[in-house]
Amino acid sequence: MATPTTRQHAWEGVVPKEDLVVYDKAGFGRKGGLGRRPGIVIIDVQYRTVGLEPAPILEAMRTYPTACGQAGWDAVHAIARLLEVARPLGVPVFYPYVAPKEAYDAGRLAGKVPSIMQIDQKGYEFVKEIAPQPSDVLIPKKHPSAFFGTPFASYLIDKGVDTVLLCGCTTSGCVRASAADAFAYNFRTAIIEECVYDRGALSHAVNLFDTNQKYADVVWLDDVLAYLAALKSSE
Amino acid sequence: MATPTTRQHAWEGVVPKEDLVVYDKAGFGRKGGLGRRPGIVIIDVQYRTVGLEPAPILEAMRTYPTACGQAGWDAVHAIARLLEVARPLGVPVFYPYVAPKEAYDAGRLAGKVPSIMQIDQKGYEFVKEIAPQPSDVLIPKKHPSAFFGTPFASYLIDKGVDTVLLCGCTTSGCVRASAADAFAYNFRTAIIEECVYDRGALSHAVNLFDTNQKYADVVWLDDVLAYLAALKSSE
Amino acid sequence: MATPTTRQHAWEGVVPKEDLVVYDKAGFGRKGGLGRRPGIVIIDVQYRTVGLEPAPILEAMRTYPTACGQAGWDAVHAIARLLEVARPLGVPVFYPYVAPKEAYDAGRLAGKVPSIMQIDQKGYEFVKEIAPQPSDVLIPKKHPSAFFGTPFASYLIDKGVDTVLLCGCTTSGCVRASAADAFAYNFRTAIIEECVYDRGALSHAVNLFDTNQKYADVVWLDDVLAYLAALKSSE
Amino acid sequence: MATPTTRQHAWEGVVPKEDLVVYDKAGFGRKGGLGRRPGIVIIDVQYRTVGLEPAPILEAMRTYPTACGQAGWDAVHAIARLLEVARPLGVPVFYPYVAPKEAYDAGRLAGKVPSIMQIDQKGYEFVKEIAPQPSDVLIPKKHPSAFFGTPFASYLIDKGVDTVLLCGCTTSGCVRASAADAFAYNFRTAIIEECVYDRGALSHAVNLFDTNQKYADVVWLDDVLAYLAALKSSE
């Protein structure tokens, strides 16, 4: 079992001391806290973002250039642990995901990341270990944030969710953008550190730091599991 | 005059080589390019984000804990250069800014950054050197992105803008969130590196890297000035 | 006191029988029902929409061409009754309102309704009888819907509101547009018939009919007062 | 060929004279005008909204309770005429449509219109006569407006559209909501009267009146065909 006292966030030892002093004096980074009605949000955990099987990132990228490799599979297993606890408690689960690209989807994306336009059907499938069940909410999206151009906010309101627990990828892409929007909508927002992943180690660390300072609580999986259990028993 | 060949982006020498290899192989970071109808977007350049006068950040923070100090004033001067060229060309200028907080604005923000709730009126004023003129569009906002909960997209559409040139602060906060949304709306999006600023050096560098890889072109002021001049002469 | 059994909705006797048969067979118009955490939404009740004092509409329009006259004042008095009951219960109150127009606000509106661009400051003031109190939430807006280009949804989420009770004007304009958006966000949505008003009798009637068929419950003030009292006593 | 001088809008003879006087004096209903880069928007023209073949509405409703019958088929033929002219000119065509309902889509809709939750797969198919071609943009939607919870605005911006020409159904539902949002985004907005349809004659007429007064130009198909031809020849 993880020992909280020795565990370090990805940004510790990465963000320089001068920056930490400034953020601390400016009064950022306080805990926002979790609410009473959580929802789990699993973003873009499709084969195109992890690869077809666990492998180092450069190897995984031979199949899908957008794969994150081992970091992705580690997160998949952490998400599986989360779902194992959350599903029996009836916590709603949302799957924002990238729908296969159509010719008319090029937009600005095809300019910045042309490789994204050529991924096979299998690449868009949800990773089996954490795949949606019939009662889960699927949210196809065309843009990074799970909220942009989707009815995600409407689903959260319908389910009475007040707290979003973010999982998936990438930390510096769709997770970050979704955290900023969830915060702007005034949902309580948390990112479960073991459950998110990225292709770049530094971007992963700094985006966790940024979001923890400004938008979300970056939390440990064990603490989330304890929170879910406590919610249940206090009902 | 700056010599492009020797100038370095803030992330160069910061993002590790392994990460650069992955991003490059994955096919990210291509130039998106600029369009024919630019608009200048100056985000949150208010005294609360720079301080009342040029000073090192820790000193500036004594007046406003959210001040960025010298980095902010350097950007103010760069933005002033940009406006000097752009205004005579009739390029529309937009000022998304943080409106003074009301009691009912606490929301999630007061949880994460309580110090933001206590800034005096002067802190909300636009910095004189780059203050709006009567024909400019003011966009009060309550959340990080200039688009979230504002009619900014409607103004851009009304003015026929196809390209947003982002300036202001912070690179890792409102500029980043606005870039992600501008990209999602399919506006061509550029961040002018000398015109944006942050309180943390690492977050500044990594957020420029992230946005340049995925959402926007991070460009130099001189190149933007040349682009604006060329647009004019080709009309 | 109103006698429910004899009271008629504005559309009764107006919508032809053939249309009623079709809507009924199609399965529209079921009661959506109200939730446990209501919020009161008072849209655009400013002097520009009622006139400076009670008067027939054509007379009121001499001061403000957008004034609705007596119908507006009748609604003002009904809203005052609502607030008298709701405020002591701590029900949150929201005031979406039209902010004074700036030169850059012309957009499509100045094309369709040029007279809207020339209203004096007094016209934008809230009508004294129902004016906001310090704890109420003000939502300046540039477009018809209270949600479009505003952070209204974020405020509703922050306050935990699950049900919006719509008042104000015009039934066929901002109330209708706000009802459609509230419904789309999955808030339970009701329009209090005595508390909304319009400049056109037919549009008023038909928009109440449309929204009652598709988006909202059109309800009577007495029933809302009873609902609020019941909520309180069941806590 | 239709003779414009004798043709009447659906609301003529329906909206009472007193209302017309008020709207006119208030300064509503001016022509907004069309722009240079139109896009055609065909909303919800699926078998569920017209029926499997032309038939009176009460008969068509036996297959799909939401069918509009003959009015729908008349519009289908008008839309086909529009496409025949517009496609060779390269005008972009957008198809916002209702995606088949999932269990998790109930939300507020299942409360107001339970019959909508039970339509077969064929009912969701596009009507063959006006079905999308591969280059057209499909926009699945969960709520009335083509803009709400969809990336429609992003597609319009990507294609450089400044004018939306609305077709489809229902006039008082998704067309009305889409017109209000298109107007709020500052797109020039027109509704082609022969190309829209509804299940209720009065709602059809009054919603055309409302939108023509406030948000959109209600125009005739022949005038749109002439406008498209003129655009082409002036390039």
Image (cartoon, coloured by chain):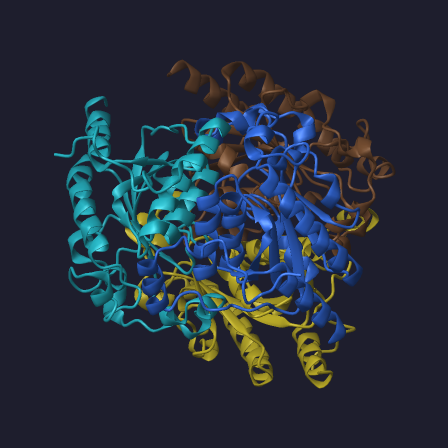
Chain colours: A yellow, B brown, C blue, D cyan
Report if residue B1 is visible in the image. no
As rendered, which of B235 and D227 lies closer to the eye? D227
- Nearer to us in this view, D183 or B137: D183
Q: Is residue B36 visible?
A: yes
In what quadrant of the picture does the C terminus of chain D appear? top left
Place of residue A163 in the rendered image (x, y in percent of width and height, measured from the top left):
64, 67
Q: What residue occupies the far left of the structure in this picture?
A: D1
* Image spot of residue D32 (x, y percent): 39, 29
Left or right, A174 with respect to A122, comes to right
Location of residue D175 with respect to C53 vertically, above or below = below
Q: Image point 43% across, 73% down: which residue?
A: A127
Q: Residue at x 42, y 75 (%)?
A: D103
In percent of width and height, residue D161 lies at 35, 36
Identified at 64% across, 21% down, the residue is B80
Indicate whether B50 appears above or below D197.
Answer: above
Q: From the viewer's perspective, tell me whether residue D7 is left or right of residue C45.
A: left
